[in-house]
Amino acid sequence: MQSFIGVLFDGFAYGMLLFLLSVGLSVTLGMMNFVNLAHCSFAMIGGYVAVVLTNSLGWPFLASLPMAFVAAAAVSVVLERTLYRRLYRSSDLDQCLFTIGVVFVSVAVAAYYFGTVQQPIDTPPYLRGSVELMGVSFAVYRLFLVVTALLITAILIVALEYTRFGAQVRAAVDNQRMARGLGIDVDRAFAITFALGGGLAGLGGALAIEIIGLDHAFAFTYLVYVLIVVAVGGLGSIGGSFLAAAVIGISDMAGKYYFPWLGAFLIYLVMVGLLMWRPAGLFGKR
Amino acid sequence: MASASGHLAAQIRWRWIESAFWLATLLPFVVTPAYLSLASQIAITALFALSLDLILGYAGIVSLGHAAYFGFGAYTAGLLAKHYWGEPLSGLLLAGALTGLVGYATSHIVVRFRHLALIMLTLGLGLLLHEAANSASWLTGGADGLQGVKVAPLLGFRFDLYGRTAYAYSLAVLFLCFLISRRIIHSPFGLALRGIRENLVRMPAIGAPSRAHLRKVYTIAAVMAGMAGALLTHTTSTVSLDTLSFGRSADVLVILILGGAGRLYGGIVGALIYMVARDQFSGINPQYWYFWIGLLLIAVVMFLPNGILGGLGALHKKSR
Amino acid sequence: MTRTLVLAAALAAAFPAYAQQTIKIGLIMPYSGQFADTATQMDNAIKLYVKQKGDAVAGRKIEFVRKDTGGIAPDVAKRLAQELVVRDKVDVLAGFVLTPNALSAGDVSAEAKKFMVVMNAATAIITTKSPYMARTSVTVPQLNETFGAWAAKKGGIKKIYTMVSDYGPGHDAEQSFQRGFKEAGGEIIGSVRFPVANPDFSAFVQRAKDQNPEAIYVWVPGGAQPAAIGKALAERGIDPRKTKILGQGELTEDEARRSMGDTGLGIFTVYHYDHNHGSALNRAFVKAFNAEYGGRNPNIYAIGGCDGMHLIYEALKKTAGKTDGESLIAAAKGMKWESPRGPVSIDPETRDIVQTVYIRRVEKAGGQTVNAEYDKVENVKDPVKARMKK
């Protein structure tokens, strides 16, 4: 029983990491139907910023996390204003091709400046090791990750449900044309959402280093997992992303623990099964 | 108003630029004989991209797992060659047929979905097949690839170092499949497919059995992709897991979009431009060539919307 | 066959005489993609060797042609090898980080009769693909079978649980280690394989912990995974000082040790090279490498490249500049030299490398963790091919 709880918790923590990496993409895809395959490049930016600040400039790890968010958000804004907004009317395929080009460029730039080597990160000692609670050992870093993710989820949901801006976002996701017709500045709402989504990806990238590592190819490697969470959760839904990420994280862990020979298959089987049952995603609109 | 058959008859007439293009594909034999291996791999990729165009460009099925059929065909041909059936032509046909069966079976699932669910489903199925092949290393050789693949000479011509047999073989198969695709596209069936792509819901209302049509074209695309895979096995005498990988599916999708989907020649043009660019950039700068490819993709989208052929087509119209 | 010979003769005749002065070496490596770091290290070592020993051998200039495979792509590797031979007219094919690429390029080496030096790819059967191929890196069985035998005999381990990555090299390592361990009288109490692209190891480590093993053997590829599994072991409370943890050298490479911190102390690994090795030759090598490449230490990819270049240079000196495959491989067979890793030689029968295998333990030295040499086994040949001969 105790090992089961341990595995459950680890899976949930992994899921929370996926959630942070994916939530931005889910909302922007749902809002503007803009296929941004370069989403994980923002995560990579956040990761590298955290590495540089913590390792080279000696900043405390916790202080580098908000900077990772800000840096990734800033880059998203610049990218959106200069290049992306010309493509809102383009076909899905063109958006795909363009953003893949952006990924290629970002991976090359990362390789050029940081090299191709794995980036280690100096996490502070109080975040290392594990604690014993009721006979189960919980890794401190994973606890930290779960708490941070839950906090952010709470903030996002409150913002979405109880602020004017959140209402605008929800309206735009539901029916963009109608929202414009009602005088909502959808483009501005989208730009802000895009920046937030990019920022969250950056934060996720920084938090991920301790668990899944960081190298120049990160933008490619994790794209598949992020797409899985977004598709299974449903476009435009924070709750959907949260649930999907949790389900995927837990089933992946539990599967590997109880049926290790199924190890690699499980995450794809879960995705295929869930999508066949609910093609629009768990909380999807269409 | 022109009749449907009149319209089709006009479309299918062979234009001079097409004849010029196909004659030009014979040039590498004479002008660049040291590049025949590259040319043969371009031809194989072009065939693979053409098969994807049938389902994506014409039927609107966006697949991120098309390499499953490519790899299945490659492994079938490889296993045949390993177990003493090394004759290429029969291996090619058998690989194509078996892949077609697999395509037909999966088409029943695939055609029931649209949009993001379809994309992710095809991705998932492709990844599952890749994992299965990795696990079944007793059959596939696993990550090291299939060993002992011995391909017999094609009609008496050995597959040599210079790649002449390889290019002749790949080019011939590409051309044949191209002719077949052309026929399909410029037929009532092809028109129905384009109707389905534009408006899925309305097609049954005018009597077109959309799901059956989609299954048919999906199967044909699977056969062609399988043959492309078999060609790769025969021309290189190797098969390994990367023929089934997500990377290969993603590459062919990028190539098709680059060239222009739904324009018959898009896959071929895309394969040519992408692989030549990659070869040249990689030769100049092996470590960061993808930076330049990324810029190329960005530039194409900015200046030539709907792919190279799409953009050129639009410019052509404007210049009239 | 005659067709090919005639064409080859015609091409050779058309070949301008002055170009015969340079010796061209074609390097095929994954310069881009997820394995790019291995190529960076290998290529850097090659460049350093040329800088130190000069770019001319036997009176002829050495020139390199570099080709990128992008990762595991045997069809591309084969085409690149063909192009290097036919288009660029190289005399030697070298590099080869990944097994599938080395295997397919081996066909080209055999058909074109070109000397080929494998500087990393570690699957045993690779050298059987071409009689003109030599290897200067290591084979997986060479390390792991030796390690298994050592663990049971000198390591004092009776029972062990094994965990490996579920793909070719992982299976290879599992088989070799278990074979060596069992033949020396040990018992395998359980095993598990994890998916190749596995970001999170907790579940598997928990399974291992449930068995309450005396020792655990781990095999993961380099990159992000060593640190990840190291941390997973620590998080689940497995202390290397109580439960012995054994692995191949990737498990405790520099970046992984840094991420694991003190929780990695006491892990035993088997490898053929560490930059910490105390010989004077190695200290000089590491110093030069550090100076040239911004403080980065050489690793197995670098040493494979360095020794590969040494083999090429020495073989060329021995043949006095003759570059055909027959002469070069004959010169390479049986060659012995002192490498920064220790004494090495090329086995005349299998053309594979014979070297010292080191057993190391992670210890603290000068405030940092290092792979301290604990024991060694000398003159180890590849056991798989040795058995094939019988």
Image: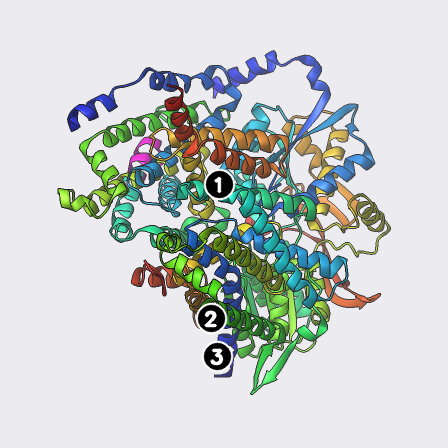
Mark 1 to mark 2 CA distance (whole Å): 32 Å
Write down the chain letter for disc 3: A
Q: Earlier in the sequence, mark 3 or mark 2?
A: 3
Q: Is residue A115 left or right of residue B254?
A: right
Tell whether label 1 touches label 3 (CB within 8 Å). no
Region in magenta: B86-95
Q: Earlier in the sequence, mark 1 or mark 2?
A: 1
The residue under label 3 is A4
Say what amino acid the circle numbered 1 marks: Arg
Q: Which one is in front, C173 or A21? A: A21
Q: Is residue C258 left or right of residue B320?
A: right
Tell whether label 2 touches label 1 (CB within 8 Å). no
Q: Which one is in front, C331 or A50? A: A50
Q: Position of residue C76 (x, y in %)?
A: 51, 36
The residue under label 2 is A162
Q: Position of residue C102 (x, y in %)?
A: 57, 41
Say what amino acid the circle numbered 2 marks: Tyr
